[in-house]
Image (cartoon, rainbow, N blue to C red):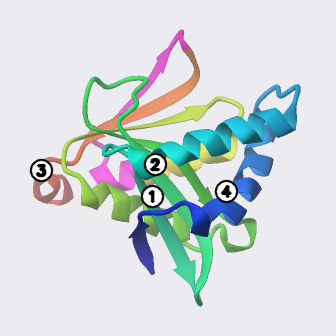
Amino acid sequence: MITRIETIDEIKPIYREYLDYMSQFFEIHDFDSWCKGALKNLQHYLIADDRYIYILKESESIIGFALVNKHFRYNNDGFAVAEFYIQKDHERKGHGHKLAEHIFAQFTGNWEVAITLKNKAALVFWEQVVSSYTNGKFIKKRTDSFKGYGFIFNTADKSRILQ
C-alpha cells in the first residue's frame, strides 16, 4: 500500500536506515552532524507546500519511501525525486518500481531524478524505471555542478507515452 503522509514521525526510523545506506556514496567526516542536517532538512516536509512524502507499506510495516519536491538540478519547474529508498530485504521484488510509478502518476508535468555516479545500482534502477514509464521518452543528462546523472521526462501526456 502506498500512502502520502503529512508527518515525518512514521519514517524517522527508516530514514535513519536510508542515511546509513547513502553514507557509502559520500565523503562524510562527521556522520552524526550529517544525519542531524538531513533530519533537519526532512523537517521542511512538514511546513513547505512543495514537498511530499510517500510511504510504501507491506503488512503494516514501512518498507520504503519517496520524497518529492521542487528543488532542481536540471529542470526549471516540475517535480523532483529528492530521496527514495526500499529496504534491502524488499529490493528486487518490484516494490521500488511500483512506488516510483505511483509518485509519477500523482503530478503531471516535468520530472527529474538525480543520482550520484557512485550509486551504480540506483543508476541502473532509475534508467529502467524511467525508460519503462516513459516508453523510452526521456533524457539522461549530466552537468558539471553535479557528479551524477539526471533523468528528465514529462508526464503531461501519459496516454500518448503508453501507446
- Pointer 2 and pointer 1: residues touching (CB < 8 Å)? yes
Write down the residue under mark 1.
53
Q: Residue at the spot x=82%, y=25% of the render? A: 27
Write down the residue under mark 3.
157
Q: CA distance from mark 2 to mark 1?
A: 7 Å
Q: Nearer the viewer, residue 62 or 144?
A: 62
Q: Is residue 31 above or below residue 145?
A: below
Q: CA distance from mark 1 to mark 3?
A: 24 Å
Q: Secondary structure at mark 3?
A: loop
Residue 72 percent across, percent down from the top left: 39, 28
Q: CA distance from mark 3 to mark 4?
A: 33 Å
Q: Secondary structure at mark 4?
A: helix
**Dot 2, crowdedness within 10 Å: few (<14), some or many (≥20)?**
many
The answer to whether one can see residue 127 in this image is no
Who comes first in sequence, dot 2 or dot 1? Answer: 2
**Dot 4, crowdedness within 10 Å: few (<14), some or many (≥20)?**
many
Write down the residue under mark 4.
15
Mark 2 or mark 3, which is nearer to you? 2
The residue under label 2 is which amino acid type? Answer: Tyr
Q: Residue at the spot x=66%, y=67% of the render? A: 91
Residue 136 percent across, percent down from the top left: 32, 45
Q: Is residue 117 above or below residue 111?
A: above
Write down the residue under mark 2.
45
The residue under label 3 is which amino acid type? Answer: Asp
Q: Which residues are magenta?
A: 130-145
